[in-house]
Image (cartoon, rainbow, N blue to C red):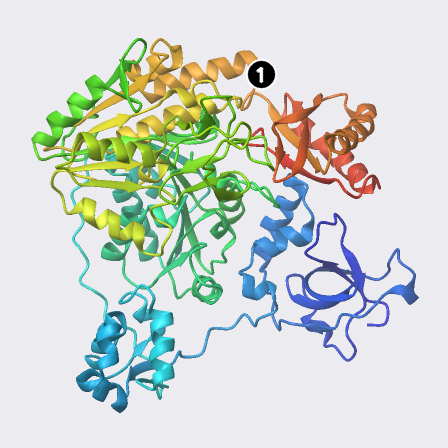
Amino acid sequence: MADLILRVAVPSPLYRTFDYLPPPQCDPTILQPGVRVRVPFGRRHVVGFLIGTADSSEMPADTLRPVQRVLDAEPVLSAEALALLHWARRYYHHPAGEVFATALPVLLRQGEPALPPATPPQWRISSPGRDALATDARLRRAPAQRRLLDYLASCSAGVTAEALRAVARDSAALLRALREKGWVESVTPPEAPRAPEAPALSPPPTLNDAQAAAVAAVLAELEQFQVFLLEGITGSGKTEVYLRLIEAVLERGRQTLVLVPEIGLTPQLLDRFRERLPGPLAVLHSGLSDRERLNAWLLARDGAAKVVVGTRSAVFVPLCAPGLIIVDEEHDPSFKQQEGFRYHARDLAVIRGRQLGIPVMLGSATPALESRHNAQRGRYRLLSLPERVGGGSEPPIDILDLRRQPLTEGLSRPLLERIRRHLDRDEQVLLFLNRRGFAPVLFCHECGWLSQCQHCDARMTLHLRRNRLICHHCGDQRAVDALCPLCGSLDLRPLGQGTERLENVLRREFPETAVTRIDRDSTRRRGSLQTLLAVIQSGGRRLLIGTQMLAKGHHFPDVTLVGIVDADQGLYGVDFRASERMAQLILQVAGRAGRADKPGTVLIQTHQPDHPLLRVLVSQGYPAFATAALAERHAALLPPFAHQALLRAEAATAEQATAFLRVGLALAEPIAADVELLGPAPAPMERRAGRYRAQLLVQAAQRQRLHRFLDLWVPLLWAERGDRGVRWSLDVDPMELY
């Protein structure tokens, strides 16, 4: 052990690994790649990852410090996980320590043991609590506490704190208050509670021909790697295809990993899974506590959970018997991490499937153009679901030309008339506007002042109900001004439409109709989204207003009219992907309209009715749109016909950010024979959160050429000791040029 050097990846924005000595009297057999170690790092002690050993170091022997402690008897990162993470580190050119840390739950990053939790205590009503229920007047002023006590009184065996979360929205606070009063008591079960009996599983529906063909195609290659692109129109039964494949994988004693864009927006998918699939379901997403995420991670690692459903970071979850990976709504931009380690979960899912030798299914009604291109090249196998389940047809899409049209708060008379017609039939109408708040900007009619964010090159959005101006980019907010800060005028007016303003006008135009608004503002409280969705599902005459939160994964059987209030914001964006995202959103929202017994209609308001891509989308559908958009990309040599990396820099001044990129450009020029360098240039939003941003784009015709260049360039950037006030990052395969 005297000559043994430990190579440790430390979670830090440093590109290199660090050498340490083994801890004294350490068993060398536990020093395996993938174990966590606690090491001195500067003035701190941090949790790092052992990635290898060596018999020598470039550092002088007397400068090496020993590892403080080895935290794991066995690697917490398996050989399979290490292979994926090393690939990701090399591909995205990101510091190894931060890459490795991303793969683990927060508690494991902090040094918690990777062990199943002890049996949680259970809570029951105490004798004083029963007396309080009968006589204590304080409970009249605390109805929520009373309801929880009533529930506990009916559960003589006790209830876990986690189970109480399903009973009361603020169960933790209520439980704490009841404990302080002595009205509840904890009970430690003498033994681990028995698993509940499996619920009666719902019988599966009969597959149509297209669904059966898709299932058969995947089952034929279930024991080998193959990427399948399942393109199915909304309502075509993609979820049923997933379920049949998962059931087949379960029969083989294997696990399935299902990636979804946002757990909170797909409650119906989870409900379907729980109804049809036996055994525990491990769910991982940002809305869970750190302990809950660790427990789900352990269930997956140990094989207790045969099905794992999670958002972006779940692509790294360990599986003891992997059999299938599914990426639902694979086109969704939320699969791309936009800060720190900027990986794309969909692409890593494909790489992981290849390393494991298992199939990967990518599902969407509107596949990403990169995925369609891969299918055209034969890298992915395309499976189609062209018909809605139950015999319904896709809703017709009509374009409403807003030019020279009188508008009522952004709504045309034809749209208002159609809304009234559908409501008179006791149906539901959904209006889509991907802009929350009351209005995008507040302005002064006298002098032209605009509500500009002090920290960003952006306007502050008016949120009328909260009486606040809020920047949706940096989060800064302030009270709405009574007077113009520039000229003192009282004539301040909202400009443009947001979902709040749309709600107000609809309540005025249709006072007899209930209005439900779903956006980030209306669903801030935990459980509020599920409550609102339940109200919608109850049926009946109702107006729905929503942002893209309503565009994904929801089934609204009573919605027969979808109105897209403003399609123009997606037609001419600064990003070349703007039209693709516009098309995907339109069709995803349109898919909420109508089912077999209630046909639907979609109306799109636009000032650009002759936009060629919009016309193709409406008249010929998404496949034709994708073909036309790919032709435009090919002519312009844009992804997927080119490969990009974006070097971003931000600093206190624009000059600092640009100066760093000029240095990067100078370092690149001697080695840039196979790539094109564009910039430096200010970011489309140059100032954000008080810092100035600039960027340098690298583009190559072939992926290998791009990475050959990056392999040489990135170490030079890390070695450059320039202005310490500059923060920089590299984004390989950027999805946002901002």
Q: Count the numbered circles shown.
A: 1
Residue 492: image location, x then y, percent: 43, 29
Residue 398: image location, x then y, percent: 24, 17
- For label 1, the SS is loop
Residue 736 lies in what quarter of the image? top right
Q: Is residue 284 above or below residue 625?
A: below
Judging depth in this view, the residue of 717 and 440 nearest the camera is 440
To which residue does mark 1 refer?
Answer: 637
Judging depth in this view, the residue of 254 and 188 nearest the camera is 188
Q: Which amino acid does label 1 sit on?
A: Leu
Judging depth in this view, the residue of 439 and 180 nearest the camera is 439
Please indicate whether residue 53 sits to the left or right of residue 372 in the image: right
Residue 233 seen in the figure: no
Residue in the image at 28% along x and 39% along y: 238
Please indicate whether residue 255 sits to the left or right of residue 723 in the image: left
Q: In this view, does 729 lie above or below 112?
A: above
